[in-house]
Image: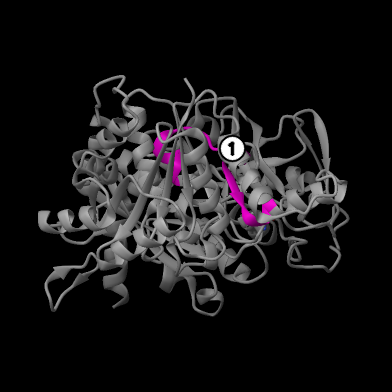
Amino acid sequence: MAAKFIFITGGVVSSLGKGLSAASLAALLQARGFRVRLRKLDPYLNVDPGTMNPTQHGEVFVTEDGAETDLDLGHYERFTGVDARKSDNITTGQIYSDLLAKERRGDYLGGTVQVIPHVTDLIKNFVTRDSEKEDFILCEIGGTVGDIEGLPFFEAIRQLGYELGRSRVLYVHVTLLPYIAVAKELKTKPTQHSVKELRSIGIQPDILLCRAEKAIPVSEKKKIAQFCNVPESCVISALDATSIYKVPQNLHLEGFDVRVLEHFKMKSKKKVSLSSWDRIVKRYEKPRGEVNIAFVGKYTSIGDAYKSLTEALDHAGIENNVRVNLQWVNARVFESADAQSKLGDVDAILVPGGFGEEGVKGKIAAVKFAREKRIPYLGICYGMQLAVIEMARNLLGVKDATSAEFSSAPSKDPRGSLVGIMTEWEKDGATEKRSAKGDLGGTMRLGSYPCEIASGSLAAKIYGAKTITERHRHRYEVNLAYEADFAVHGVIFSGKSPDGALPEIVELEGHPWFVGVQYHPEFKSRPLAPHPLFVSFVKAAKENSASLKPKLATARKKAA
Ligand code: GLN
């Protein structure tokens, strides 16, 4: 049967959680036995978010097939377990670069190239391609209705409604009912205006998902239904949830998935069971204990900058039955301040991925503290490279050990820079080449690569497998010429690319838990399938917490 298309648009304000709503609906349809795929249309002009600063756009989510995509694709994967692909995220920039390349090739045969039909056709192709195996394609449009950039996308989905017929297309519009405290009322007017805007470009929504901080009275639902031309049963309230894991259940209780099936005149393939989500919600909301993990990064004031990572830690917390409290430490802080004052009372330390020189000194100080004080340490990507640099400097005595990323001075050591630019590597049997001066966008070692784990290592214990695959996003690599020296000090490269050329995992023997990984395990963690590395890390934090707390308390008392 041909796939049905569900378009999710937003109105009133941004940040309404369209991505999460789309992901939750997909999870509900999945629970009813359907195959789903989620897609995101981003109206901005960047070709992809890969080169965007996380402070502006949040994390860059990396897919198995190596695309740098919007963080909503992370929600999609985490809620459905379906791996997103390169072909699931498109931006205006990408559409236009394809279009202009075609135009230069002469593909338009001398015709005038226009937004309608040429841009809209490309958008429609993107939405509908590779949809044969799915029951539902859920497609979220970034931004808010009325944005100038979004117009071609809205026009394209309007056309699809017309071309495929309304029996194959459903429009969901997510809006906000602001609560006005003095009037003690939820206001429906912005929703009415937003739907008016949508209708002015030819789209009549079928379902309204109304975000609100308080329960929506029946009278207000009626009003919305009447003004917006939507059946009252299709005005769904989406109240602020106590946790994101509760959203699928909440929307289910509101009948969202039922309304969707009714629209398509479809019957559920099976009885919905949300018991696995139930278990997660219960554990997440009432954990048995807590751990404090220092998160030493550069963008510590914006939670979205490390979305997958904070979620992965939450998943591991749920698995370990503890709440993971993150202590956000801006790496710049203890470039001057002493590490003890910032990290002295945490149960574990994490240094996430990052780029550039800023904050490097502080991150290295955090590594040193974790290593010397035997505090569980997890270094991800940059956090692994900097851990290796710290150990080279302070264990091996290579004082000028550095990375070509932030030091252009040639290394005095004949083995070269400890962390150097990667110019060649293997991907699926072929050699990938990069020049140091090439484009920044889309040129890193990206996506899933295999890694072989040394038997007997901590990594082997954690993964319980010999070969794993993990997702990458980096330009530099640790130089294995120093490996033998490291081994003398118990620093073991316990995971490597199958050809042995690229280090993937480093660990420190004799330390309670010290692991650095060149890849980003966080992209593969899911609430229903937490990632073993994070589960083990949080477990180590838990053990450290139990064993250190009394000692710390005595030490503090003595110091006082
Ligand atoms: N900046 C480092 C590199 O490019 C690490 C990248 C990252 O942490 N994702 O290799």
Q: Is residue 18 above or below residue 166?
A: below
Question: Is 78 in the magenta?
Answer: yes
Image position, residue 13 (x, y; %): 38, 66
380 to the left or right of 547: right
Q: Residue drawn at (84%, 45%), measured in percent from left and top?
A: 109
547 to the left or right of 402: left
Q: Is residue 138 above or below residue 186?
A: above
20 to the left or right of 180: right
Q: Residue drawn at (71%, 51%), measured in percent from left and top?
A: 442
346 to the left or right of 357: left
Image position, residue 137 (x, y; %): 47, 35
Amino acid type assigned to the residue bearing label 1 in the image: Arg
Mark 1 crowd level (few <14, some 14–19, many ≥20, 10 Å Cα): some
Q: Write down the region rendered in magenta.
A: 75-95
Query: Judging from the image, what secondary structure is the residue with disc 1 in?
Result: loop
Q: Toward the viewer: 306 or 256?
A: 256
Q: Toward the viewer: 555 or 522?
A: 522
Image position, residue 36 (x, y; %): 44, 31
Q: Is residue 492 visible?
A: no
Question: Is 509 in the magenta?
Answer: no
Image position, residue 489 (x, y; %): 65, 47
Q: Residue drawn at (48%, 32%), measured in percent from left and top?
A: 82
Classified by dominant secondary structure, the portion drawn in magenta counts as helix
- Residue picked out by circle 1: 85
Name the image quarter holding residue 332.
bottom right
Q: Quadrant of ligand 1?
A: bottom right
Name the image quarter holding residue 362.
bottom right
Name the image quarter holding residue 125.
top right
Q: Is residue 541 visible?
A: yes
